[in-house]
Amino acid sequence: MITASSLPLRSQIGQVNQRLKGWEALRWVDGAPRVTDVLRREVDRFGGIGALYGVLRADPWSAVHWHNGIPPERSAEAYAAVQDYVTRNGCGVPVLFVEEAPHGLQALGGTTLPVNLALGAGMDVELTEQLADAVGAEARARGVHVALVSGLDVLRDPRWGRAEECFGEDPALAAMLVAATVRGMQNHVAVVAKHLAAQGAGMGGRNGSGAPIGPRELGEIHLRPAFAAARAGVAGFMAAYNDIDGVPCSASRDLLTGTLREDWGWDGVVMADGTAIDRLRDSAPDPATAAALALRAGVDLSLWDEAFTHLDEALDRGLAERSDLERAVDRVLALKRRAGLLHERAPVTRDVAALVDRAARQAVVLVHGALPLDPAGTVALIGPNADDLEAQLGDYTPPRPAADPAASTVRSALVARLGEDRVLHAPGSRVRTALGPDALAAVEAAAARADVCVLVLGGTSRRSYGDEFADNGAADGPAADTTNGEGVDLASIALPEPQLELARRARASGTPVVAVVVDGRPRALTDLAALVDALLVVPFPGPSGGAAVVSALFDGTATGRLPASFPVADGVFPVAHDERMETARGYLDHRHPAGLPFGTGARVTARVRWAEHRISAADLAHGGSVLITFDVTGTGSVPLYGRRHELGVRPRRRTLLAVRRVDGEPVAEFRLGLDELGSWQTGRPVAVPVEIGLWATDDTDEPADAVRIRVTDENGTTPWQR
């Protein structure tokens, strides 16, 4: 077996480096793959390389598209060309092939799923696992070894452009869905989960900014999804850009070694985010010192950094030990064995289309109003997102093929259902900018002739091949109408004024108005809600999102719930349903900052049956549980909320304890164990004596009839009782 100690120093350094971008290391020339001088120089320099990122990546940043990229059916051939060169001309150790898969494989022909925020709206753990299994099978069939998968970030500020990559604002929901993703995808490929940790708590919602939070907030909110991923056996974690209380994640030994390895007992690979080690230059005097900081903290594999090429200097200067480097190399080699590089396995394929369609339908949230619409009427279809497929897809999305029969916009789906003559289309504006008086006049004319106005508004993570990008692929000077995605953090989350004007014109027509907000972040929708008869919110639902929206409009299929709270006004953030109780009254002009709280949506009613529930902390710690029964009507997701009453700790207003999908059954159950009833103060569940109020209604505060669970001490009591 190949180990770190059997490799020379330069090869060891090569194994922890992932400097190259795949589209620069290999080109598709005259219908065949060709390795480039960039790859040749790297292999010659280090006697091999640990991993190669993005051979298949296709998007505006890589400048790879259908005319110059690797045909999907020839992916394995492209990988083979690289692997053959690396193993023949290096130390003989194969290279890991690493690809992005934040919501589907980011490659030509890769399946695009609804974004994570949309899966959060569906709150369907089983479906999330099935989708991940299908994407993992697709990636493996094309030769991928490692998938980089978003899911650890918890959405705590809607100004953050990467809100769409989060499952929502609630750590329990994120933990359930990221664990499902890891389980499903790792049936086929290794997963590196990102980002560790607290990137969603950045100051002002700015990407990569510091997270000024204490250890309890870190543990209860931001480490819980990571622990769930670790327990599910995730192969790796990606250390985030941000610092936590001043210490960068990629240089935090407390986080990457103390928490992950020593406290949790996890033993996988930690990869730095792209250029994150080079960014340590604000915390270190030179590249060698930055490299040593990261290596000693627990980073095993770099991404596009120069700093790790200075590890020989770091060793010479005594900034790190050879044992630090060999430990990292052995972890990379272990990942290669796990990924099948040193013992190949046969790929498996899955049919994913039906799963994607189902997820898109579950992502549609009916905030208020009555649906379905009359199928005999004429529709005035208004708004910038009504006929824009790219506005449904989210960031990190490969270009769609020219022939795309499974895709649908709201307009194409409406035309398919009602016919061209009963769909009066008038865009009215762009996402952020107006189109002028003629466009508004067309809106008014369409509204006057229609039986109902359907406004399709919101945002877009559109990337164009002429856009500018930062060195890590984030938008850097995006197009005027881009409102979401990495690098597109916003100071204002109000719905753009040109879109509100469309709602005013439609309202003035006297025709009933339904608004559909397709977006990747929470918005302040109070003004819009007052102008419309019904309001739907749809986190970027993917290529079949148009059909999902039309089904909700005419079949009444909207069963989603808001995966994050929508502020009552611009400037009222951050806001979350699980904020701690306040002794003050809140804002003078907005007593209730969460205009639309987490969980708003599904037309399901549920009530927990009253009973006395008691379990000892010792039993809970050793696998004991409490069975909760509830009565339910309707179809959709049922959240179970709780409030912890711990002596000396200000409680959160409510927390999500569990969630499950129901489909018409009148009685259902929750089984609550350590995850649901334990304390997450340290980032992993611990059984402590506590009283917890439970309810399954939409109340944002504990209702008077909440059912109580008592987790007792050795004397059979709780500190709250004493």
Image: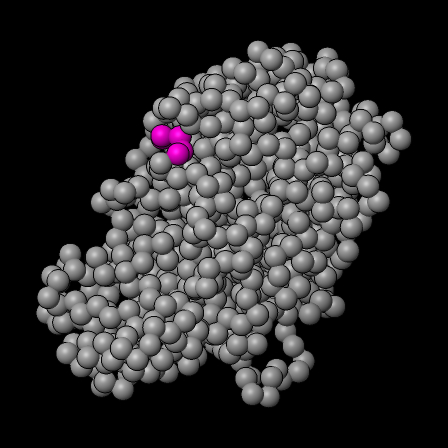
Answer yes or no: is residue 312 visible. yes
**What percent of the width, then of the height, locates residue 289?**
82, 39
**Looking at the image, which is closer to me, 152 or 6?**
6
The image shows residue 526, relative to residue 392, as above or below, that is below
Answer yes or no: is residue 594 visible. no
Residue 58, quarter of picture: top left
Quadrant (top left/top right/bottom left/bottom right) for the N terminus: top right
**Looking at the image, which is closer to me, 525 or 365?**
525
Q: Main SS type for the magenta part? A: loop
Range of residues picked out in magenta = 68-72
Instruction: State left or right for residue 648 relative to residue 643.
Output: right
**What percent of the width, then of the height, locates residue 576?**
56, 68
**Looking at the image, which is closer to me, 698 or 55?**
55
Q: Name the residue: 57% across, 11% down.
A: 88
**What percent of the width, then of the height, locates residue 23?**
50, 33
Image mark count: 0
Q: Does 196 lie within the magenta span? A: no
Instruction: State left or right for residue 301 relative to residue 528.
Output: right
Q: Name the residue: 80% across, 26% down.
A: 312
**What percent of the width, then of the height, locates residue 105?**
43, 38
Quadrant (top left/top right/bottom left/bottom right) for the C terminus: bottom right
Q: Does 69 lie within the magenta span? A: yes
Q: Name the residue: 24% across, 42% down.
A: 403
Instruction: State left or right for residue 120 relative to residue 589.
Output: left
Instruction: State left or right for residue 696 relative to residue 685.
Output: left
Q: Name the residue: 75% across, 15% down.
A: 8
Rendering colour mode:
one colour
Residue 409, quarter of picture: bottom left
